[in-house]
Amino acid sequence: MTAVGIEGKTVTEDKGFGRQKGHPATYSGREYSGVFMPKVKFEIVISDARVQRTVDAIVRAARTKKIGDGRIFVVPINQAVKQLSE
């Protein structure tokens, strides 16, 4: 993502399920078959002009073509407020 100009992001370890529900999956060398599977969530705020290049970079880097590949949601950010330290 650095190559396409992404300078900041938030990464969160999360749990959830999608199509792989009920199917065993391997994550970090361990097999899981429970309802909630370990996930990783990236949150990135970028300009509209960078959206497609960023989506393409994420797909190239993260696609495994296996059940459990995630989704990329592109949503508008109408306002961002940076809280200033006193």
Image (tube, rainbow, N blue to C red):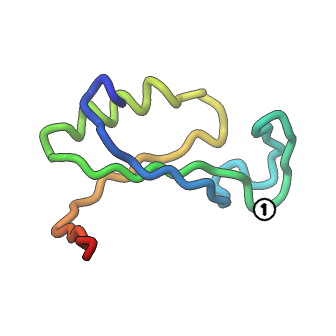
Say which element carries label 1: loop
Foreground pick, 25 / 78: 78
Which quadrant would residue 2 be assigned to in this image? top left
The residue at the point 34 percent across, 44 percent down is 8
The residue at the point 23 percent across, 71 percent down is 84
Residue found at the far front of this picture = 86
Which quadrant would residue 56 be assigned to in this image? top left
The residue at the point 52 percent across, 30 percent down is 62
Q: Quadrant of the C terminus?
A: bottom left
- In the image: residue 40, left or right of residue 58: right
Query: Residue 48: image x %, image y %?
Result: 15, 46
Residue found at the far left of this picture = 49
Q: Is residue 77 depicted above or below 67 in this figure?
A: below
- In the image: residue 76, left or right of residue 37: left
Callout 1 crowding tier (Cα within 10 Å): few <14, some 14–19, many ≥20: few
**Residue identifier under label 1:** 35
Query: Residue 45: image x %, image y %?
Result: 28, 52
Q: Quadrant of the N terminus?
A: top left
Foreground pick, 4 / 51: 4
Query: Residue 34: image x %, image y %?
Result: 83, 58
The residue at the point 44 percent across, 52 percent down is 10
- The amino acid sitting under disc 1 is Val
Q: Is residue 2 depicted above or below 19 in this figure?
A: above
Query: Residue 42: image x %, image y %?
Result: 46, 49
Residue found at the far bottom of this picture = 86
Q: Is residue 43 depicted above or below 67 in this figure?
A: below
Across the whole image, how many numbered discs are drawn on residues? 1
